[in-house]
Image (cartoon, rainbow, N blue to C red):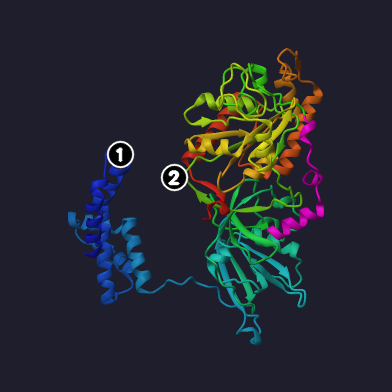
Amino acid sequence: MGVCRVLASVVFGLEPHMDQSEESSFLQDTLMGSTLHLLIRVYERLLRFGAQRPKPIQDSAVCLAGELTIELKQSHTRPEIVELCYLLSKPHLKSLLSVHDSVAQKGFDPELPPLPDNICDEEEDSVKIVRLVKKEQPLGATVRRDEFTGAIVVARIMRGGAADRSGLIHEGDELREINGISMEDKDLEDIIPILAQADGAVTFKVIPGTREEPAVNNINTFVRALFHYDPKDDPAIPCKLAGLAFRRGDVLEIVCQEDELWWQARHHDGTDSQAGLIPSRELQERRVTLQKPAALFRPQRSLSHGPEDADYGAITGIHIAGLRKSFRLSRRNSESRPSGWRKFKRPHHPGLIPTYVEVVPYHRGPADPHRLVLMFGPSGVGLSELKRRLLLSDPELFSVTIPHTSRKQRRQEKEGVEYHFASRHTFEKDILNHRFIEYGEHGGNYYGTSLESVQRVLAEGKVCLLDVEPQTVEKLYTREFKPYVVFVKPPPIERLRLSRRKTKVISSTDERTQTKTLMEQDFEDMIASAQAMESQYGHLAEEVIVNDDLAAAFTELRNGLRRIEEEIQWIPAAWAQH
């Protein structure tokens, strides 16, 4: 009765923590239910009889029941006899008796086919006949031709597949026959369809290899993919059917890294336990380096020559004060991004190739600061309006930084509301001390967003919203901020023409200047800028939003920010290290 005592202790210990919720009621009903107690009694009875090592009285209960039924039917039809015949005919009782006979006869091992008659004497000690049963799933093995002997051998066993679960086929085994078909004169291209089309029982005739089995590392690694991959488009993959397709941003569980070129992985949230082949980090870096895509190594465009940020904020006349002002429902004192806007002094390494980043699960604790929300995208895509709607939706949760400036304070402005005002000398000193995330000069005055202003918002227990240049994302991609990066991109140019054809934007920071309508060249520049950003910085984004419809884009963004507050997220492993 040890298990029952443990269960009673659990129930007693949980009693102070029980409430009226559905979860507590379900747990209490489960622990106190008769079904669980009956199962425990059966379990303890089996343990007691197992220690006694009982032996079956006979091993043909099914035959005995059949003979008894025939004999009873020949007797008088008393109610008791009719009821007993009815019970013996029930499928549940027949199954129970069948299991009894299987256990009594010790018939646990599968029935293997007899050895073929054409096995030579010298092979009798080395040949192995393996029969695997599979349904629609692949066998989970790839083959190659031995360069010295020309034999067809097993190249790799995919983790979680039928071959791996059986434990009967190993890497290095030589395949002689598959379902009676000789492999002697077959090409590799002929063998793959045979393995793929085989269904049900598949019989292999193999010569065991001499390769030692590597030690199995049960500690798997999780990575986020930083590029798209489809094995159907990869001519180098050993077997397209064994490949695993994924999209940039997918979290993969790496289950085997023994092959330096091809890793075995599976989607961490998938139901398929079988792994698939993906290019290793080394292989992917090598291939991208050889291809040298122009977008990856394109020099950064100077921000001083970029257009002003023509966004929905300029259309509606509702701005975040300055580009980085605190929230105001007025654009009376708004400023556009200074033309000389700059980043942190940090060297950029265009040769770094995004492949995979190791990640770990993360859930923000009650005492932890919120994750910094970084949004980037091309001018005119609507970053300011999305940020404005977030602030309106929950001003107690979302906030923005207050920028710094070296210009003179105007009469209607207050320190720490529209701006933090500083002298030009002080501003330049802060620049030299790298206190600004971004800064620039416009009209003879400095404007900038300080690192301290971001930290201040987070210290207040709020989510800090920043729309920044993509280069700044790299600088803030640290353990301190654990940023949630959102890339907002425009729709295809056909949709862009329809949705923005009547859009008017302020052409300069002078409010007396007339507005202008977005032209075809503006649309083309927006698309080109988005493509360049995505190719060079898209791997940093956890979420990509296409702003075709502003309401739909806001809903998608709001749902994503709600998930990072409520659900477990995957963050770079380096951010979790202490």
Q: Position of residue 60 (x, y in %)?
A: 33, 71
Residue occupied by mark 1: 21
Badge nearest the viewer, 1 or 2:
2
Residue at image point 63% right, 26% down: 384
Q: At label 1, which amino acid type do we have? A: Ser
Residue occupied by mark 2: 365
When the figure is inspected, residue 126 is found, relative to residue 308, above or below; the finding is: below
In this picture, residue 111 sits left or right of residue 534: left
Task: Give the residues drawn in magenta, as a range.
Answer: 281-306
Q: Position of residue 224 (x, y in %)?
A: 61, 50
Query: How many numbered discs sit on the rendered protein?
Result: 2
Q: Position of residue 426 (x, y in %)?
A: 65, 35
When the figure is inspected, residue 443 is found, relative to residue 269, above or below; the finding is: above
Query: Does the rendering let one see residue 78?
Result: no
Q: Secondary structure at mark 2?
A: loop
Residue at image point 82% right, 45% down: 294
In this picture, residue 203 sits left or right of residue 513: left
Residue at the outermost bottom position: 122
